[in-house]
Amino acid sequence: MRTEFETIAVERVDEHVLMLVLDRPHAANAIDTQMGYDLRDLFLDLYVDQEDVRCIVLTGRGERAFCAGGDLKERNGMTDADWQRQHALFEQMVRAIRECPITLLGAINGAAYGGGCELTLLTDFAYAARTARFALTEITLGIMPGAMGTQNLPHAVGERRAKEIILTGQPFSAEDALAWGMVNRLCEPEHLLAEAMATARRIAANAPIALMQAKKSMSVATQVDRHTGYQFEIEAYNRMVPTEDRQEGVRAFNEKRRPRFRGR
C-alpha cells in the first residue's frame, strides 16, 4: 500500500488500524483534483490488498474544517469539459471508497460542507466534534450533490429530512446530525480522535473476514429486498464457517482468553 501522497496523510497507528487525514488545511481540506487522485488510488490499493488493515479512521487536518467540499477556487473558470473530467475522477473516488471492504470510521472534526458532508455519508459510521457543522450546499451553486449525497442521505436521515437538507442547502449542527441519525456520537473536540481510535481498535480486534463479510451484507441490505438480502447474508455467513478464525473464536471463548485472529 502506498503511503506517500500530496493531499492526504496516511499513518498506520496500530497493527490493524490506519489513520487517514485530509491534509489541505490552508484550503479547509477542500477536495481538489489531486486529492481526488490520492483518495481514489489509496482506496483502490486497499480494495486489492488490505494488508491486514481492519479499520480506517478518516479525519481532517486542523480544528476548523473536516472538509469544505469541492475546491471552488480550482473550479473557478473551468470549462464544462474540464468540470466533467474532474467529476469523472471524483466518481471513481466515490466508488473506490464505497467498495472498500475495510470498515471506515469518520472522525468529523469541523465543518463538513458539500463533498465533505458526502464523505461523512460514505463512511460506515461517524463520530463528530460538538463544534462540527454540516451542509449540502450544492443547490445554492446551481448544481446538486454528485458524490452519492442524494443516495446516502435518505438512508441516513429519511427521505423527507434529506429533501429538506438538500433542497434548502441550509447548514445544520452536530446536535442535529446526531438526532437525525447522520452521526453516531458527539465528542468534545479534544477527545474526538481518542474516542474514534478506541472504537477502531475494538473493531480491529475482531476477525477480518467476518468484518468484511458483515459490512458487505449490510451494504447489500439497503439495495435489495429482505429476502434477497438474506440470501446474500447466508452466502456471506457460510464463507466464514471453514475459516481458522471461526475455530479460533470458539476455542478462545471456551479457554476464556482473547482470540488471536489471523484472517484465515
Image: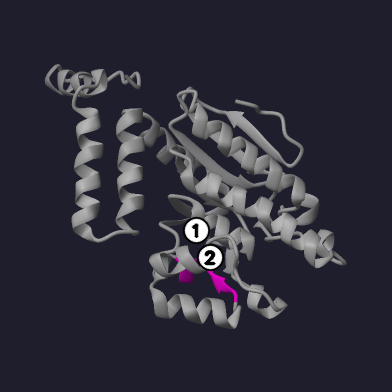
Is residue 245 rendered to the left or right of residue 49?
A: left
Residue occupying image coordinates x 50% and y 41%: 194
Q: Examine the rendering and report whether any part of residue 164 can be seen.
A: yes
- The image shows residue 86, relative to residue 196, as above or below, that is below
Asked where in the image residue 251 lies, by quadrant, the reply is: top left
Tell me the element at label 1. helix
Q: Position of residue 102 (x, y in %)?
A: 44, 37
What residue would you read off at disc 1? 121
Q: Position of residue 166 (x, y in %)?
A: 55, 76
Residue, far left: 254
Quarter placement of the C terminus? top left
Is residue 239 rendered to the left or right of residue 52?
A: left
What residue would you read off at disc 2? 149
Circles 1 and 2: CB distance less than 8 Å? yes
Q: Please tell me which of labels 1 and 2 falls first in the chain.
A: 1
Residue type at the position of mark 2: Gly
Residue, far right: 77
Total labels: the figure holds 2
Is residue 27 rendered to the left or right of residue 97?
A: right
Magenta span includes 172: yes
Label 1: few (<14), some (14–19) or many (≥20) C-alpha neighbours in 10 Å = many
Q: Position of residue 61 (x, y in %)?
A: 68, 46
| Residue 200 tag number | none
> How far, Cα to Cα, is label 1 from label 2?
7 Å
Q: Which residues are magenta?
A: 171-177
- The image shows residue 169, relative to residue 215, as above or below, that is below
Asked where in the image residue 209 lies, by quadrant, the reply is: top left
Residue type at the position of mark 1: Leu
